[in-house]
Amino acid sequence: MTESDSAAAAALDAGDGAGDERRDFLLIATSVIGATGTALALWPFIDTMNPSADVLALASTEIDLSPIEEGQSITIVWRGKPVFVRRRTAAEIEEARATPLDQLPDPEPDEARAEKSEWLILVGICTHLGCIPLGQKSGDPRGNFGGWFCPCHGSHYDTSGRIRKGPAPENLVRPPYAFLDETTIRIG
Amino acid sequence: MSQPTWKNPIVAWIDYRLPVFTFAHHELVDYPTPRNLNYWWNFGSLAGVMLVILIVTGVFLAMHYTPHTDYAFASVERIMRDVNYGWLIRYLHMNGGSIFFLVVYIHLFRGLYYGSYKAPREVLWIIGVVIIFCMMATAFMGYVLPWGQMSFWAATVITNLFSAVPLFGEEIVNWLWGGFSVANPTLNRFYALHFLLPFVIFALVFVHLWALHVHKSNNPLGVEMTGDSDSIPFHPYYTIKDAFGLGVLFLVYFAFTFFAPNFFLEPDNYIEANPLVTPTHILPEWYLMPFYAILRAITFDIWFISAKLIGVIAMFASIAVLFLLPWLDTSPVRSATFRPVFKQFFWILVIDCVVLGYVGANPPEGWFIPLGQIATAYYFIHFLVLIPLIGFLERPRAVPDSIASAITAGTNPGVEQS
């Protein structure tokens, strides 16, 4: 309020000091309601940027596992991201289970990582900054722990997809999945 | 300063109602400018010219570009091969970005060297830092539009930075993407914002100039203008000097545009984006490499805070620390000309930034990791420890009373720097 405004207000309220308080209340109440309304009106704009209905509709994928031999891996696309499906060998499972949990930056037992020990199903995105780790193809480097190796910033994952060395803070993420029968899964 | 009288009746008629001509005369012709500015003071106006060139070339590219993941890459190739002079406009835009950053970085270091951020120019400085920040966001989103491999993976790496935010990280990233990965909604919004932000920068430049014209330019001596004997009118003295500088800059800019147009670009960006294959080395453009090096320098957790989050914070802090610089620098003397100790450390900082850029351009392996960590630590030590300490401990050389007295005494220490 400028000086002349408050002078005018004072003149109006002459002989009645309560007027100032009422004006202040009205001013503050109006400003608060106005600001709240504006803030609420922002939400539709912000929400347009969230995943839309058509994107959400394509959120689950079914896969037939039967053609995958022991020791083989496949990469499938789920929600625009690669999902690694690896049919692990007995040696790989043994190696993952033998690792003491206190050696892991993000401790998690192998039993909690795979519903059926043979099938390791993980989102193939490095938990550091979202690169795709190598290790799916037979010629790829698999890092120091036989799992995956992320070439971007040098994260090493083991045969359970757990982070062992490098900047990634967490293990490769296990997507939500369910076995529909012995050889079919649905991801998402 | 005299009020101009307009002889042309149309000009006079308009000026009476909207005094644009008087305004332009005051701010661009009569405008008193220190008489001792050296060539480092060219870079502000050069940056302005580059911004205009980028907006003009960008608008013409927008007439031919298709912001859809199925067509973006092909539409850029069409611009290169089929659109008349499309190759020229694109190469001017692409290399123009690099030249813009080059010019602005020199402008920034000019300000650091001559203490241009000190009172009463703190707000001017802060607006400048905001402009650089907006430029980085704009450049990053522009890099994504051709939808090559580097485009896609730079977008993935940089948007994933926000997943380091505690609690809401994943929600924020999905919101930025408009999905569960970098995809068509992401490309669409980046295009919209890449179009919008340069105009925001343009408005910020206007405010930057407004703040500049209140207290006028700093100068190599770092002493304020005290009267008419310290200043010369902007036109014709600095219009001609800026025009000469622009000619030199264009030689460099067009040398790249015509003879090495892909010098700054990663070859991988001529491979169309593939969400299932990560390139061996994901690299940002050269002007973001020092910040990329700082991001990757943090490879260790501190207490419960993950290395990833600290890296992100460090990267943003490396720019944010510049906001505080006017208050971190405790020295009353502006120009490094009179600050023998600060001057040495200024050049060490320049070297440190080049080292950071070099580390950022290389894979995070072997000795690049400790080198990046040392350079990152030094960067922050420079601003947070050395700058306040030097201000207290250094004994500055005698500062002249005025620009004119320094020049007429036959010694002009400002000249030796240029």
Image (spheres, rainbow, N blue to C red):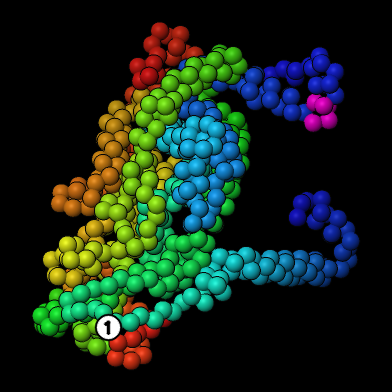
Crowding near the residue tagged with mark 1, few <14, some 14–19, many ≥20 C-alpha atoms within 10 Å: few
Q: How many marks?
A: 1
Q: Residue at x 39, y 66 (%)?
A: B163
The answer to which quarter of the image holds residue B18 is top right
User: What's the amino acid at mark 1?
Assistant: Ser
Query: Percent from the top left, x then y, of residue B70?
Result: 49, 56
Q: Quadrant of residue A68?
A: bottom left
Q: Residue A10, relative to residue B386: is it above or below?
A: below
Q: Percent position (x, y) of residue A14?
A: 88, 63
Q: Position of residue A61 (x, y in %)?
A: 41, 79
Magenta-highlighted residues: B14-18
Q: Nearer the viewer, residue B315 or B365?
A: B365
Q: Residue at x 51, y 75 (%)?
A: A56
Residue where numbered disc 1 is placed = A66
Screen quadrant of the N terminus of chain B: top right
Residue B120: percent from left, percent from top: 53, 36
Residue at the image point whose x is 37% and y is 61% from the top:
B275
